[in-house]
Image (tube, rainbow, N blue to C red):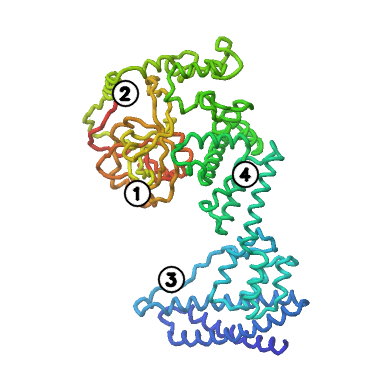
Amino acid sequence: MDALKTKRKSLRTSFTATANKLKECLAKKDAAKDGDKLRALNSQLEDKFLRLDEIQNKISSLLLENTDTAAEYETNFQAAEDYRDNFLELKSKLETLLNKDSGSFLESSSELDVIKLNLPKFELKMFSGDPKEFLIFWSIFSKIHDSEELTAIDKFQYLYQSMVPDSRAARLISSFPITTENYPKAIEQLKLKFGREDLLVQIYVRDLLSLVLKNATTGKNAPDLATLYDMLETKLRALESLGRTKEKFADFLEPLVESCLPENVLRAWEKSRISESTEDATSQRSLEKLMCFLRHEVESEEMICLAREGIGKDRGSGAIRKDCQKSVHKDEPTTATLISSTTGAKLNCIFCDRPHLSQDCQRLSDMSYEDRKSQVIRKRCCLVCLKFGHLAKRCHSSVRCLICKRRHYPLLCPDLRKEKESNLSSKDRAADNEQRSTETLVTNLPSEHEIYLKTIMIRLRNKDKEVCVRALLDDGSQRSYIERNLAAELFLSSSGREIFSQGLFGGGISPASEHKRYMVNVESLNRKYSTPLSLLEQQKICSTLPRIHDRKLLSELASRGIKLTDVGRDSPPIRVLLGADILGSILTGRIEVLSSGVSAVETLLGWTILGLGKKKDVVNLVTLSL
């Protein structure tokens, strides 16, 4: 041991002298640098480092075999790492200089200076022997394990330092002497004991079962939905990394995930699932759709908390969070709270006996007005609020029909019955009146500003049929719509019908009408984001909206790394409207205000802009709703 240390000391002295000579040569001006001398010093430095590294490895092995020299080993290892860093830094500088051709050799020496950033030191993930931590540990350490530049001894030393002292994993690694032959054996034993795939799968599945038991026993003290969603996502990602993907094991994992949910969320999920199309039985129960539903519920609660922060900003964050969660149940902003806040009794529809509110039943299109009324009377329910236990004359509900303004729901409106009994010619006349109710006036308004609305190109897909269309992002609309002809082009199947009136600008209300509802997959043009959406049909979305073709504006957007999808001089029709029911989940929150005052807004579907553009002689389309 002493002989090796003496030899190492001499080599370190020689290495330092050669390194100082090389630094002096590199510090000279380019004109005074001698390429041949630099290459010679580089060869000498590399030879000394290799011999020094060989002796250092021998000393490290001897120190590790003796348990009383742990502190000395740490000191020696740190000193060896300093010499290695010095060697690699000089080698990098020299290679940068020598790789330049003779024409660029006389450039300013300032370009050869290496810019050093004061980044924090990279720390290895410590492993204690807990199988739950193995995936994270191995994903980080595998970079060292797969490195071809490090020797087996170096890898063994890093592995030894990655173990938590006095842990099960540390005792296992310490049982192997640090030699080149023992390194692969130590890795193999580590994987067999802590990284067995079947063991890890059992652990994460049992974690899901523990959530099920906790949900059954804790009741009101169960974690909030956001925390529960994060816990589920963590465990499902771990199972997916072990090969238990959501697609292959959905039938096994979905019942476990459903059992983890609170009762009110589970009711909301069942209602959402039932409202979808029943043509494909396999598509109704999907783990991917369930997690997507939970994500939207969490996002809805977060948006509510964000809106309430201004009210409780003078109080602590805990009070704000508490008020936000209370407001979720009070104001009924999400599907889950809509179900939980109505009543604690069993919520079964009196028309189809399924778990949803009777006024929301989507299976009434084949029932006449008389059949609906008879069913309500037969179930001994109120003709006003559709609830059991009292008559209409004693009902205190504030229900008002959107069609006739009397006290009942639209599904029991006599005026709606008269409208359905009208002949085909009256429908044609109504369609003609609707077409004539919107007149487009073409006026030449010179030197007026172009006004950009939030338009974007999206991709709609239904099975093997897909099409790219223009969409308008309108947070002033409560619902989202799809053009009726577009739904036919995509061969969409109706998942239900809704009857409602539409509020117009100026306070007017359109006559109540029936709208079909469709489920369709909406994707960004680059296919990086995709989500299923529920859209209502509409004969026509809006009049023509101009695209952006201002080169100066496009250039400024490009300089900020923003690429729009809806550009050009032509103006295709708007065929989809995405309203406030969808925008809350696709807005990223990033907004860029340009020098002209136009704002660029980022969504998960891409970038869009809005605002007042430049002045230009254009023909504007003015739409008057009569």
Residue 66: image location, x then y, percent? 76, 79
Helix, strand or loop at label 3? It is helix
Give how far apart the Cα atoms at labels 3 and 1 are. 31 Å
Check disc 1 and give the amino acid type.
Glu
Number of numbered labels in the structure image: 4
Pair 2/4: label in front? 4
Helix, strand or loop at label 1? It is helix
Q: Which residue is mark 4?
A: 228
Query: Residue 370's quadrant in the figure?
Result: top left
Residue 352 showing in the rendered view: yes
Q: Earlier in the sequence, mark 3 or mark 1?
A: 3
Residue 407: image location, x then y, percent? 50, 14
Pointers 4 and 3 in contact (C-beta within 8 Å):
no
Helix, strand or loop at label 2? It is strand
Helix, strand or loop at label 4? It is helix
Check disc 4 and give the amino acid type.
Leu
In the picture provided, is 420 more to the left or to the right than 229? left
Decide which of 61, 258 is in the foreground and name it. Answer: 258
Q: Earlier in the sequence, mark 3 or mark 2?
A: 3
In the picture provided, is 282 more to the left or to the right than 527? right
Give how far apart the Cα atoms at labels 3 and 2 are. 66 Å
Q: Which residue is mark 3?
A: 111
Check disc 3 and give the amino acid type.
Glu
Q: Which residue is mark 2?
A: 625
Q: Earlier in the sequence, mark 4 or mark 3?
A: 3
Residue 232, relative to residue 482: is it above or below? below
Residue 86: image location, x then y, percent? 57, 77
Pair 4/3: label in front? 4
Give how far apart the Cα atoms at labels 4 and 3 are. 53 Å
Decide which of 245, 112 is in the foreground and name it. Answer: 245
Q: Which residue is mark 1?
A: 556
Q: Which residue occupies 42% across, 51% down?
A: 528
